């Protein structure tokens, strides 16, 4: 029985390690990647393997974290999205997706854990309609 | 082009009239009934004709407003539910459904309008998954 | 003393009229336009004249309501944004901006009024820091 | 059967009239006063007659709207509080009470109606504990 | 000085152990039981000993988690309630209680900790009215 | 790279130790003090060194936790504030600041961690306006 994983995208190795360690110690499963293209490839291969996205914004050459989030939301329209950033945080109001959380660097690990957990808990239990009662 | 209606259940004629008038003047379409059985019959005949439920709790002999709400939620699991009541309001924590609003009598009409509007606006836009982008 | 206006963008004339009338009767000032380019031009000319954006998604040839919202948020990062749409509502999770509300057509006018008012009331009172008390 | 009234405190006559008219047309009962001392006297005489407080901040000589709100909350610890202000809005974070709403002047009337209604609807249905079921 | 305990109801031994271990490591006190009848008996014996309920839905023969939650809410009308379930999650909209959280299995332990903590923190500080100030 | 610290104010040594240990183990940096005057002095010396306030209410002779919170909010109007208290909790509605959390003693450590993290995550990413896009 597996819960799926949190997809973590961060191009700075030390911060990626911190995030992976913090999330795993809290009890999450994590798949960490270091570029937007790696993130999108991992997600497209198995969308159902991922239960949340945690992404840095500036990811070197190529797409940014804003694009990664829109990409995964086009397939899973309500998947939890948490952004972490320093100087790009002010663009969240224009570039972020709905029901996402923006965490400004530097941050504390419990902020990340609480953000992902809160968004997961706000997910509707299921998308399949309930059966009418037979009463 | 019709938006569907708010199903209003209230056994006191004067209050039912107040609710119908207030909601219609604000711009809602309303179907008013005076018993739980009439409410459930109207709903079962055309579930898609209703976009919200507004129900008194004590409705004379037969089922209460608590039962009406559970009944409609078994078919439409996220339909907005607003209760109005005097002496039954304290049972809301045990008998109400999730994401509902309990308004204690006596009330002001804008409370009703705001409650229904707010719950409608929190509905997920659609239940059908979005198409993956072709990029 | 003026409060600024709600910028309303809708290419269907009848719906635009309904929105303008409903908002004005409720007490709002409204500037209505019928295309994305007209909306962006009106906003760019006087960003401080607008306190909220209400936009349809599909606006004929040219940019969509998604682009209009991102455009105004790049200048005013927390301005209230409400979308109305029929068949594009399911893309909100990927294309919408944070802290926006998606209202699915057909809708009731009080949903619009409540959505705009609620978002306006969640605005931080001011962006200027308070002065330290002299105690 | 009376719902109690909204206590409105505003020292500028024209704005007080606007608020009274707007709230009454929406369906609220209103008691309007023009100073903090009049507000506290009216409230102390009959605390149960009031279901919400709407107060300007700067009220001429004597206590401010911040003091009026703390005064009524000392007797009714969860009564809805809405502030309206121009230049004092930035002090809300330090001087306001919990679960209040700060609306910056100039404002639209539906903001006021929605703020009061939303806070009233968040009130717990009753403070008296429910009886254990006899099952 | 004791904080009371979280009442955990889960009929699958391995999952019950996971929940007990996870909650205790986080700092909670836990009372774990494996049936609805044991849960209701433990609660009825000392309602004040419990600060939250965490319950599976399908609990073998006898009442379900839906019934356990309604039972405890009839005595303590605002006690935090968190459900965990796999195939019963879609019934939450009809069978759950207000202000509860539904977590779908499989889950991560921090989701449980965050859900219980968040609901506890939303509790009104006290039910006893404050004393009027003597000013 | 430092995140700043949580300022913890508690005059009972054992509880202060519990709070410091719990927060540090979770990943926060903590500055603990045992009186209101020490808290205000530490804050005034370096306001930017603090990202949140966690304060007991009754702090012996001198100002209470209510005053400490108002003091820091006068300089940083949106800094997260969490109160912990036993017998003063009922005054929160009158004496607390907006967007604060009141936690009643006795409490569990994850309540504190979740409260601080949640309030930090609700902070607007930045107060500086974003640059208009050059499109």
Image (cartoon, coloured by chain):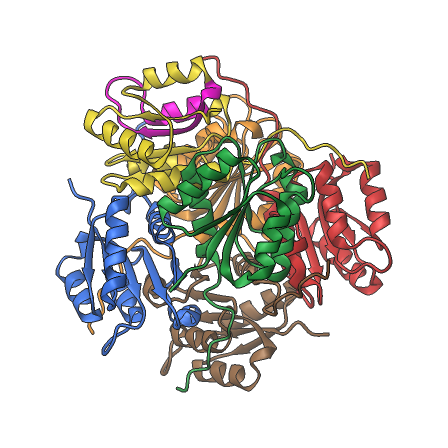
Chain colours: A yellow, B red, C orange, D brown, E green, F blue
Q: Nearer the viewer, residue A68 or D34?
A: A68
Q: Nearer the viewer, residue C59 or C94?
A: C94
Q: Residue at x 64, y 62 (%)?
A: D26
| Quarter of the view holding residue E94 | top right
Question: On the picture, is A50 further left or further right than F2?
Answer: right
Using the image, determine if residue B1 lies above or below residue F87. Answer: above
The picture places residue D25, in percent across and down from the top left corner, at: 65, 65
Q: Residue at x 33, y 15 (%)?
A: A37
Q: Residue at x 20, y 45 (%)?
A: F3
Viewport quadrant of the C terminus of chain D? bottom right
Question: On the picture, is D82 further left or further right than B45?
Answer: left
The picture places residue D39, in percent across and down from the top left corner, at: 49, 80
Residue sitting farthest toward the left: F45
The picture places residue A7, in percent across and down from the top left corner, at: 37, 25
Residue A32 seen anywhere in this rendered image of the structure: yes
Question: On the picture, is C122 further left or further right than D28?
Answer: left
| Quarter of the view holding residue B88 | bottom right
Question: On the picture, is A62 further left or further right than D21?
Answer: left
Q: Nearer the viewer, residue D84 or E63?
A: E63
Q: Residue at x 67, y 49 (%)?
A: B81
Q: Is residue A55 magenta?
A: yes
Q: Nearer the viewer, residue E44 or D29?
A: E44
Using the image, determine if residue A120 lies above or below residue D116. Answer: above
Image: magenta residue range: A47-72
Q: Is residue C62 magenta?
A: no
């Amino acid at each position: 029985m597996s819960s799926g994983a949190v997809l973590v995208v961060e191009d700075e190795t030390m911060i990626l390690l911190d995030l992976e360690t913090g999330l795993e110690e809290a009890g999450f499963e994590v798949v960490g990647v270091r570029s937007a293209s790696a993130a999108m490839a991992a997600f497209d291969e198995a969308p159902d393997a991922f239960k949340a996205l945690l992404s840095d914004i500036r990811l070197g050459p190529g797409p940014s974290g804003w694009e990664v989030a829109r990409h995964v939301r086009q397939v899973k329209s309500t998947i939890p999205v948490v952004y972490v950033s320093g100087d790009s945080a002010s663009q969240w109001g224009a570039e972020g997706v709905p029901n996402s959380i923006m965490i400004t660097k530097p941050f504390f690990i419990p902020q990340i854990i609480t953000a992902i957990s809160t968004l997961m808990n706000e997910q509707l239990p299921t998308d399949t309609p309930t059966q009418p009662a037979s009463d």
